[in-house]
Amino acid sequence: MNMRDDFGPKTIDAIGKRASYICSNPACRNLTLFPSIADNNKFIYVGKAAHITAAAKGGPRYDESLSSAERKSIDNAIFLCSTCADMIDKNNGIDFTTDQLRCWKKDHQEWVRNNLNKSLNNPITTIDGEHIAKGKGNITAIKTTKPTFFKPGTRSLAEGEGNITATHIGS
Ligand SMILES: [Zn+2]
C-alpha cells in the first residue's frame, strides 16, 4: 500500500500555473518551462510541486496533525524548480522551515501578480490640474506609486513648514 500522500494531477497542474511556472524560491526564480530547440513539438519542463510538509512519515517537515487529504491538498504544495525542490529536502529539510516555505509561496504569488502582467495590474495613472501642498507637517501635493502620465500643464506646489513635498513618485 502506498503510504505517501502525493498530489493529484489537478493540484500539480494548478500549483505550476499559479506560480507562472517560475520557481517560488525568491533567490532563484528560474523559469521552469521553455521550448526545445531541437524539436518544435517538445518543451523542457523542470518544475516540481513540492510538499511543504512531507508526503510520508519521517520525511522533511512531516506534520502528523494533518489529515491525508490536507497533506495532498494544494495548501501543502509549493511550486519550485527541480534544484530547489531537492534543496529544501536535503538533510531531511532542516534548513527550510514550514513557515519559510509558506512565506516563499505567498510572496511569490504576490510577486507574479505585481510584476508580471504589468498592463493589467499597473494601468497608467493620469494626473492633471493644480495640486498644492501648504501648511505644517507631512504634506504631499501629488503622490503616485504607479506609472503616471502627467498631462501638460499639471502643476504641483509645496510651501510650508516641515516635510512638504510637491510631487512624490514611488512607494
Ligand atoms: Zn529554484
Image (cartoon, rainbow, N blue to C red):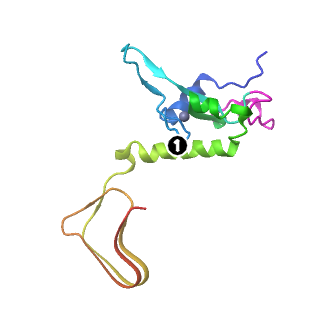
Query: Which quadrant is home to the N terminus?
Result: top right
Q: Which residues are magenta?
A: 56-74
Q: Position of residue 110 (x, y in %)?
A: 51, 46
Give the residue at x 19% y 69%: 153
Looking at the picture, does residue 133 appear above or below residue 37? below
Q: Position of residue 126 (x, y in %)?
A: 28, 60
Q: Position of residue 33 (x, y in %)?
A: 46, 26
Q: Nearer the viewer, residue 9 or 96?
A: 96
Q: Nearer the viewer, residue 92 or 136?
A: 92
* Occupied quadrant, residue 85: top right
Residue lying furthest left in this view? 152
Main SS of residues in magenta:
loop
Q: Which residue is mark 1?
A: 109
Quarter of the rendered image showing ligand 1: top right
How many marks are shown on the rendered structure?
Answer: 1
User: The disc labelled 1 sits on which kind of residue?
Assistant: Gln
Q: Position of residue 69 (x, y in %)?
A: 72, 30
Q: Secondary structure at mark 1?
A: helix
Give the residue at x 69% y 42%: 98
Q: Nearer the viewer, residue 83 or 46?
A: 83
Looking at the picture, does residue 13 appear above or below residue 27? above
Residue 134 within the segment the image draws in magenta:
no
**Position of 1 compared to 52: left or right?**
right
**Position of 16 compared to 38: left or right?**
right
Q: Crowding near pointer 1: few (<14 within 10 Å), some, many (20+)?
A: some
Query: Which quadrant is home to the C terminus?
Result: bottom left
